[in-house]
Image (tube, helix red, strand yellow):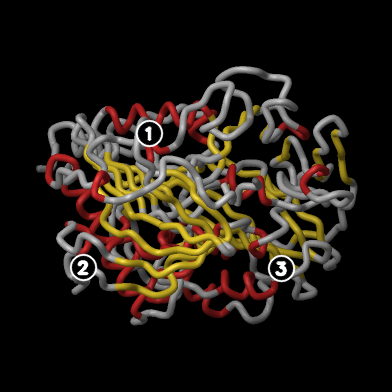
Amino acid sequence: MPTTHSDSGGRFSRRTILKLTGVASAAVALDACSSAPAGVSDETAAMTAESPATVEVGNIAAENQLPGSRGWRKGKNRATDVALTGAYAGQSSIYPGESVDLFVSTTSDHWRAEVYRVGSYGGKGGRLVWRSQRQPGAAQDEVGYLPETRTHYAKWRKSLSLDSADWQPGMYLIRVAGSSGADWLVPLVVKSPEVSGRLVLMMSDLTWQSYNEWGGRSAYFGPAGGFPDRSRAVSFARPYANGNGTGKYFAMEDPVVRLVEANGLPVSYVATSDLTFDKIDLTQAAGLVFLGHDEYWTVEERALVTRARDAGVDLAFLGANTMYWRVRLSQDGPRGLPLQTIYKSAAEDPVTGPETTARFRDAPAPDPERSLVGQEYECYPATGTYTVTDPDFFAFAGTGKRKGDTVAEIVDVEVDRAYPGSPTPKNLQIVAASPTKCLNTQTLSTTTYYSHKSGAGVFSTGTMGWVLRGLREPTGSGPRKFTERVTLNVLRAMLAGQMGVDHPSQPNLSTFDLPSYNTTGRA
């Protein structure tokens, strides 16, 4: 939320064939935890049930045939008060075989860590891959503060180091289960050693951290005076105070993760902070997928994504308000964890130039997001009715929608709109134009698509409600069926080849009477 033909010779040839012995390692972990707490029978079954001895790294379909567990749901239900049990990881993401540090504060006498890979797993939603021995509980309440940037961080001692030697790449939830019944969840990305020929799902930890109010401040609000008292830099050395400890993951990323896992699509996962620190080569991916709310980007991230598009990699933006704020990210923040700087004001930021932490569209280095996304942020709070204007668009196949047909609920919270004029791609195609109201102002939310000269196709839903509302609706509901079908059509087209070659855009921006400036006052 802002304040004011398959190219298999290149893209599909470099797949990793490493194998992991997940069942054996799980059995060792279980043997080391003979005093498991009551009520974990399905977790025990998941770790001991007969299953394939090896799973090819990245084989999502085979991975999801392994026994599942609902223990992560217990953790979600019990993760309600960070003061009773709270935790954070020393890393947003790791590669298989790397360790992850866990920092825990709890009023419970003792606790355990349980690690779940998120997926389908027969409808259970996760697989238990590791459980610690019982750990002594200790409350840690020392808070650090950087007054010059109003930055809060936790001065906690490391509680446990977790070994990921036999974990499959994927999205993980670490459940800290306190003996008193107070739990916490910690999100963790286990990255694939290779992204070639796969969809890369971006877990937006930069945005999660910007909204994190642990310590009393976020990049939006402070205790004394709202926005003026906000943090100008936010630390990764602290728990996520919202989302049951996962930030915005459950609302904005989890529905897409479960959709791709349930359908066995070949995917890799990265945290958006990886695109600053690791400089991951994305040019061999089948496509890059940005989820419900990916608002905060570094200059380095944008350069890597742009380079991928220019190399022919497809992009899909499944939300709105994407790439709005420019941030800087350093590795040497408090406690040795990253520090994300975001003044949100060129006048305040001591750094002037391309890395000034203001909006991408603003001076001193204006570079509006629509040059990459195809459209740009329009307004908040938004409510509208999704309206199909081009039913022949390839991604609408199988939805049964005709021109003018509508879908309820999915235009919500924040929306984007196509803007005429440079730097909007000249061959932009508007496939849905939805009447939308922001407070008392009428505007449009658009869904757009363009094909790039590299062969890449770029799809943008233009509404945060796509994931937050549509993909989270009950199975079988109208909004859920529509958003699932369109999303899968896009993702499968990305895997089949270059969308821009197989589905060149049909320019129609000039047929819409759209202002070249924001008329809502809510951007």
Q: Where is residue 137 in the image (x, y as percent from the top left)?
A: 83, 61
Question: Which-is-in-front pick, marks 1 and 2?
Answer: 2
Q: In this rendering, is residue 288 above or below 348?
A: below
* Label 2 Cα crowd, 10 Å radius (few <14 / some 14-19 / many 20+): few
* Label 1 Cα crowd, 10 Å radius (few <14 / some 14-19 / many 20+): some
Q: Where is residue 507 in the image (x, y as percent from the top left)?
A: 20, 44
Q: In this view, does 276 lie to the left or right of 504?
A: right
* Kind of residue at disc 1: Ser
Q: Which of the 4 quarters of the picture holds residue 487? A: bottom left
Residue 422 bears which disc, if any?
Answer: none
Q: Which of the 4 quarters of the picture holds residue 182? A: bottom right
Please report the residue visible at 65 percent of the width from the left and 28 percent of the height from the top.
331
- Looking at this view, name the residue that lies furthest to the left: 5
Q: Which of marks 1 and 2 is nearer the N terminus?
A: 1
Q: Name the residue under label 2.
A: 403
Q: Where is residue 145 in the image (x, y as percent from the top left)?
A: 87, 38
Q: Which of the 4 quarters of the picture holds residue 174? A: bottom right
Give the SS element for disc 1: helix
Question: Do we see residue 144 in this rendering?
Answer: yes
Q: Is residue 285 left or right of residue 171?
A: left
Q: Nearer the viewer, residue 413 or 19?
A: 413
* Kind of residue at disc 2: Lys
Residue 371 bears which disc, if any?
Answer: 1
Residue 183 bears which disc, if any?
Answer: 3
* Label 3 Cα crowd, 10 Å radius (few <14 / some 14-19 / many 20+): many
* Kind of residue at disc 3: Asp
